[in-house]
Image (cartoon, rainbow, N blue to C red):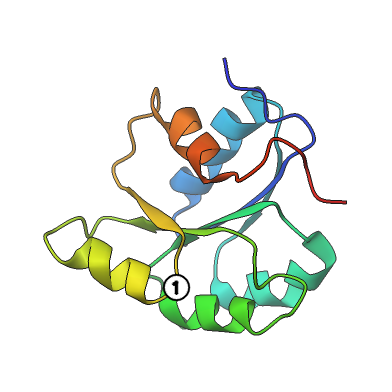
Amino acid sequence: MRDFSGIKIAVVDDTEGILMLFSAILEAHGAEVTTAEDGKAFLEQIENLFPDLILLDIQMPKMDGYAILQQIKAIPALCNTPVVALTAHAMSGDMEKILEAGFTGYIAKPVDTRAFPDQVASFLSSGTPST
């Protein structure tokens, strides 16, 4: 079982069920999880969070994941934080578009809940949390 003790993970998705599912899985593995239902709410709190990893939905109302990513990358203290796209867009060419935009990678929805912790772990560059 993956151990995310001391790891801070932010999940941004406009679907309440996704937020609840991902939070439950990550917290069961010891992660400290913060959620936001939209990009604006997330950006208002991000500088106080300093997450080790951000899981970011691409398709959201008001502000999409690409716009949120650009704002995250403009914050010096967070510009090296891995940001992983959560997307139902897993067609040919989508991965290239996501990576070219500056995302660390992506996790396709619907998510395989058994594989999800390993997918998350693969995006954490080190086993130590940020301070």
Residue visible at 44% across and 55% down in the picture: 15
- Extreme right residue here? 131
Q: Assign the N terminus to one quadrant of the image.
A: top right
Residue that label 1 marks: 102
Q: Can you see residue 13?
A: no
Residue 21 to residue 54: above or below: above
Q: Position of residue 54 (x, y in %)?
A: 59, 57
Q: Position of residue 57 (x, y in %)?
A: 43, 62
Residue visible at 62% across and 76% down in the picture: 72
Q: Quadrant of residue 119?
A: top left
Callout 1: 10 Å neighbours few (<14), some, many (20+)? some
Q: Nearer the viewer, residue 83 or 59?
A: 83
Q: Position of residue 125 (x, y in %)?
A: 61, 46
Q: Position of residue 68 (x, y in %)?
A: 53, 78
- Extreme left residue here? 92
Task: Identify which amino acid the numbered label 1 is placed on.
Answer: Gly
- Extreme front residue here? 126
Q: Can you see residue 7?
A: yes
- 11 lies left or right of 14: right
Residue 24 to residue 37: above or below: above
Residue 54 to residue 115: above or below: below
The secondary element bearing badge 1 is classed as loop
Number of on-image labels:
1
Residue visible at 37% across and 54% down in the picture: 106
- 2 lies left or right of 129: left
